[in-house]
Image (cartoon, rainbow, N blue to C red):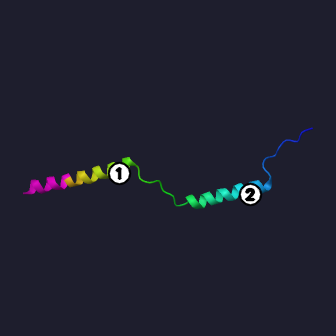
């Protein structure tokens, strides 16, 4: 008669648990780098503000 497996042995489960803890600590403060779309949006916002400032200056004088 075969005995069904109950999963990994205790020492292996402890190793895996410690690996998860390490990964959590390493990734705790991780932030994705800005994407190309974010950079383009910032550039367009800056260009729009510069154009509006130029327009206001031209309209005053």
Residue 46, image x, y percentages: 27, 54
In the figure, is residue 56 to the left or right of 35? left
Residue 23's tag is none
The N terminus is located in which quarter?
top right
From the viewer's perspective, is 44 left or right of 59?
A: right
Is 58 colored magenta in this rendering? yes
Label 2: how many residues lie within 10 Å, few (<14), some (14-19) or many (20+)? few
Quadrant position of residue 21: bottom right
Magenta residues, dominant SS class = helix
Spot occupied by residue 3 in the image (x, y as percentages of width and height): 88, 42
Q: Is residue 3 above or below residue 46?
A: above
* C-alpha distance separating marks 2 and 1: 43 Å
Left or right relative to 20: residue 4? right
Name the residue: 67% across, 57% down. Answer: 19
Q: Are marks 2 and 1 in contact (CB under 8 Å)?
A: no
Residue at the right extreme of this rendering: 1
Residue that carries the numbered disc 2 in the rendered image: 14
Q: Which of the labelled discs sits on residue 39, or is there none?
A: 1
Judge the density around disc 1: few (<14), some (14-19), many (≥20) Cα neighbours within 10 Å. Answer: few
Q: Which residues are magenta?
A: 51-61
- Residue depicted at 32% across the width and 52% down the height: 42
Decide which of tag 2 and tag 1 comes sooner along the chain: 2
Tell me which residue sits at (29%, 52%) in the image.
43
Question: Measured from the top left, where is residue 11 in percent x and y?
Answer: 78, 57
Q: Quadrant of the C terminus?
A: bottom left
Q: Is residue 10 magenta?
A: no
Residue occupying the point 10% across, 54% down:
58
Disc 1 secondary structure class = helix
Mark 2, secondary structure of its residue: helix
Q: Is residue 28 above or below residue 8?
A: below
Q: Is residue 29 above or below residue 41?
A: below
As drawn, which residue projects farthest toward the left? 61
């Amino acid at each position: 008669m075969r005995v069904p497996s109950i999963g990994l042995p205790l020492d292996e489960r402890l190793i895996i648990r410690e690996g998860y803890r390490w990964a959590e600590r390493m990734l705790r403060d991780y932030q994705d780098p800005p994407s190309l779309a974010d950079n383009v949006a910032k550039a367009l916002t800056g260009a729009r503000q510069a154009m509006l400032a130029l327009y206001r200056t031209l309209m005053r004088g």
